[in-house]
Amino acid sequence: MSKVRKHAFMIAIFAALALLPAIFNTYLIRSEAAGFALWNSQEAYFFIYQDSAGRRVKWLAFPLLAVGEGFGRIVSPDDRRGVLFVLRVTPEGVERHDLELLDHEPGSGPGNFTTRDGRIWANYPAIGGLCWWSGDHFERATPDEQQRQGGIGGLDYHGYYRDQNGWSKYPVTEGSTTVASLHDGIELQAYGGRMSGREPLSIQMRKQGGQPTTLLKLDLRVGLASKAEYKNTFPQER
């Protein structure tokens, strides 16, 4: 190969390498999780939200994004996903339901959980306000139920309480630990995790002093992710 051709070849290689950061994406994910635990001596419910926000950024622009966020510049995510994990625990077993939230914005899922008349009521704006947990989904309240329950104004807005009409309610938040006990020696522990230490949110069950069983484990994280992980977190992204 002549010197001229070799020189031209090297220039082409360096040019291609210089273009790669402008062509290929880097992927970032921020995942947070929190929720509530409600229980009495017979059963326990966990309503746990996981909100994930994602950014798809060209490698060339990534340093500028990092510097901008370091100075407080907030950029809307390219993708967002909200999932509500519902667990019901009784001495007979564990039920789990994963619900895609209809509105992916943080705080848009059901809230103000209230135990009354043998049901768990909530305010879920995406389906019309007052609703109740029917076992595998939230059912919108009928006009008659709206009247009898006093609408969303009749819901419980307290963040926590202990043994109120037989029920207890506590938040599951970052850094918190909630312990609940049921009949038959069942102990439940919900740990809110820590994003700073990459400690996941976890819910564990222990029966009569035996080894704990993990019922739910959700990552709390912020940082770079692989393309495969990104697509797994945001299936709607193509």
Image (tube, rainbow, N blue to C red):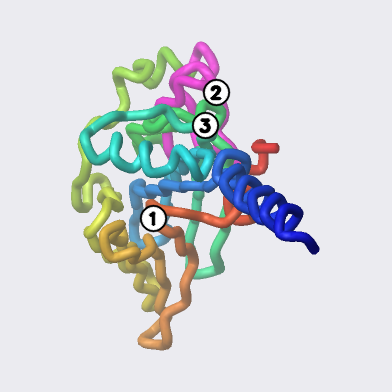
Residue at horizontal 57 percent and vertical 46 percent from the top: 18
Disc 3 versus disc 1: distance between alpha carbons? 17 Å
Mark 3 Cα within 10 Å, few/some/many (few <14, many 20+)? few
In the rendering, which numbered label is found on residue 78?
Answer: 3
Disc 2 versus disc 1: distance between alpha carbons? 34 Å
In magenta segment, residue 128: yes
What segment is highlighted magenta in the picture?
Answer: 118-144
Q: Earlier in the sequence, mark 2 or mark 1?
A: 2
Amino acid at the residue labelled 3: Asp
Camera-side residue of 79 and 172: 79
Disc 3 versus disc 2: distance between alpha carbons? 31 Å
Query: Is label 2 in a helix, a strand or a loop?
Result: strand
Please tell me whether mark 2 or mark 1 is closer to you in this view: 1
In the rendering, which numbered label is found on residue 14?
Answer: none
Q: Which residue is mark 2?
A: 140
In the rendering, which numbered label is found on residue 221?
Answer: 1
Amino acid at the residue labelled 2: Arg
Percent across and percent down for residue 167 are 29, 50
Residue at horizontal 40 percent and vertical 18 percent from the top: 148
Percent across and percent down for residue 139 are 57, 29
Image quadrant where one finds the C terminus: top right
Whether residue 135 is visible:
no
Q: Earlier in the sequence, mark 3 or mark 2?
A: 3
Residue at horizontal 43 percent and vertical 44 percent from the top: 49
Mark 1 Cα within 10 Å, few/some/many (few <14, many 20+)? some
Query: Is label 3 in a helix, a strand or a loop?
Result: loop
Camera-side residue of 51 and 10: 10
